[in-house]
Amino acid sequence: MPRSIRRSAVVLATALLAVGTVLSAPALAGTGGDTRLAPQPFAADSGDTCRYGATEGTLDWLPVTAPPGLGSVDVTGTLADRPYERDPGPICVDDGLHSIVTFYAYGRGTLIAQAAEKVDNDIVKFTFRLGPRQPSTGVDTLVVQVCRASAVSSRPIGYCGVPRVYSSSWQ
C-alpha cells in the first residue's frame, strides 16, 4: 500500500475512533474526565398563600463512578422566611413561625442521609454534600420539603409544603 494511502487510513481510523468516543459518552459537566452531571435547579415552598418559607438553588449530582460507590449530591441554595428586610413580595405579617427546609437523600428507596436548614424572618445561604457514609448505591433521589414551625420548641411543626422530588437522572 502506498505511503499516502496508509497515512490517510491511519488519520481516518483515528478520526472515527474520536467520533465514536464522543458519541458514546454521556452528557457530563465540565471537561477532562469530570463525572458530574450538569447542575439541576430545585425549589420548594411552605405551601401557604403568602409563601412564608421558600427555598431554591442547585443540585450537583456526583454519580457512583467506581466501587466502592459513594455517589452523592452537592446542595447549594437559599432559604427565605418572610417577612424579611427588603422583601420584594407581597406584605406578609410576622406569624411567629420560622421556616425549616429538610433534604432527604435516598439510594434505591433507602434513606441514606438528611440535612436541614432553619431561618426566622431572614434569608440564609447554605452549601453541603449529602451522601452515604459507607459504600453503597449512592444517592439517586433527593426530596426537598419546607415546613413552618413555632420558635417555641415545645410546639409541634405547624404545617409543611408539598415535598418536591428530584432525581439524579433528570436530564
Image: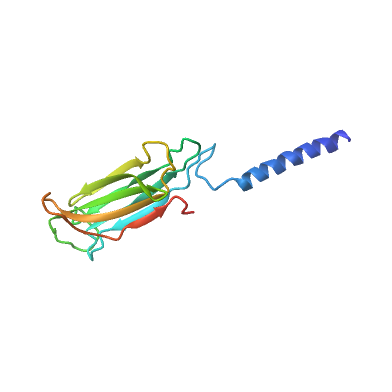
Q: Residue at x 32, y 53 (%)?
A: 144
Q: Nearer the viewer, residue 14 or 147?
A: 147
Q: Residue at x 18, y 62 (%)?
A: 92
Whether residue 41 is visible: yes
Q: Residue furthest right?
A: 1
Q: Residue furthest top?
A: 3
Q: Nearer the viewer, residue 21 or 169?
A: 169
- Check the image and tell me how it is coloured: rainbow
Q: Nearer the viewer, residue 108 or 65?
A: 108
Please state the total of marks drawn on the protein image: 0
Whether residue 55 is visible: no
Q: Residue furthest bottom?
A: 49
Q: Nearer the viewer, residue 148 or 15?
A: 148
Measured from the top left, where is residue 169 in percent x and y? 47, 52
Q: Quadrant of residue 137?
A: top left
Q: Residue at x 37, y 48 (%)?
A: 110
Measured from the top left, where is residue 72 in percent x and y? 41, 42
Q: Residue at x 33, y 41 (%)?
A: 128
Q: Quadrant of residue 1?
A: top right
9 over 168 or under it: above or below: above
Measured from the top left, where is residue 147 in percent x and y? 23, 55
Q: Would residue 75 be found to the left or right of residue 28 on screen?
A: left
Measured from the top left, where is residue 35 in percent x and y? 50, 41
